Image (cartoon, rainbow, N blue to C red):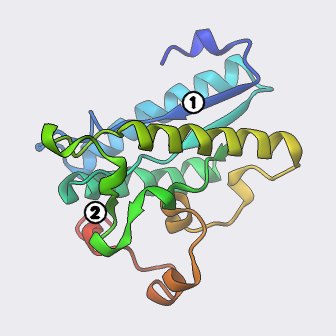
Amino acid sequence: IDPTVCESYQNIVCMVGTNDLKDKKMTEDGVLETYKLYKGKLEQIRSINPKCKLLVCPVLPTRLASINKKILCFNTYILNDLCTSNLDVHIVWGFNTFVDYQSGGVLKNSLSGPHWEGDPLHLNLAGTKLLVKLLKDNIFSLKRSKRPSSKVDGRSYLDVVAGPPSSRQVGRWANHAQVPSYAHGYT
């Protein structure tokens, strides 16, 4: 992303993919360095365009638990650092629609790449349509309301990754301090 091209936009949506996180040699320190680069870009965008609505998407899960550990780590940095910064970002909520909770919190099969191509990382057409709808809904929601920026929302990490929890999830994650089983080792 080149922050200088963001100067005149009213709404800017920033989303990190999994390409940098899929490196098998990447450690938690590597995830932190990737996050710092991302945050630096957001800081540049904010300084170039201080009046824009800056929307930040959590990284979507994949069908691979090993990459999801790194995604959880990255999204935790979004919650613990970015949401409490003075960048006035808005987190795009609702990513729970992408998660298959029965399979340990991975990306739903119906939204991932075609099985015959063996693509566990990327969204298929249905997943892309869902993502576009989610982005539109969040942007229009910001326009209709005076929703506070995410730095004061007080939402938990699970909300950032998966959206506000359902009553069934609240039972599983009673105090919101637990994380899905695939995340152990990166919390």
Res 92 label: none
Q: Position of residue 121 (x, y in %)?
A: 26, 42
Residue found 37% across the figure and 36% down from its top: 17
Residue found 18% across the figure and 43% down from its top: 26
Q: How many numbered tags mark residues here?
A: 2
Quadrant of the image containing the C terminus: bottom left
Residue found 46% across the figure and 83% down from its top: 173
Res 186 label: 2
Residue found 61% across the figure and 54% down from its top: 93
Q: Amino acid at mark 2?
A: Tyr
Instruction: Tell me: residue 118, above or below residue 160.
Output: above
Instruction: Tell me: residue 128, above or below residue 11.
Output: below
* Residue 109 makes an appearance in the image: yes
**Residue that mark 1 sits on:** 42
Q: Position of residue 71 (x, y in %)?
A: 34, 51
Q: Quadrant of residue 133?
A: top right
**Residue 90 falls left or right of residue 42:** right
Q: Secondary structure at mark 1?
A: helix
Real-space Cα separation, disc 1 to disc 2, in angstroms = 24 Å
Q: First in sequence: mark 1 or mark 2?
A: 1
Instruction: Say few, some or many: other residues with alpha carbon within 10 Å of mark 1 (under 14 / 14 to 19 / 20 or more).
Output: many
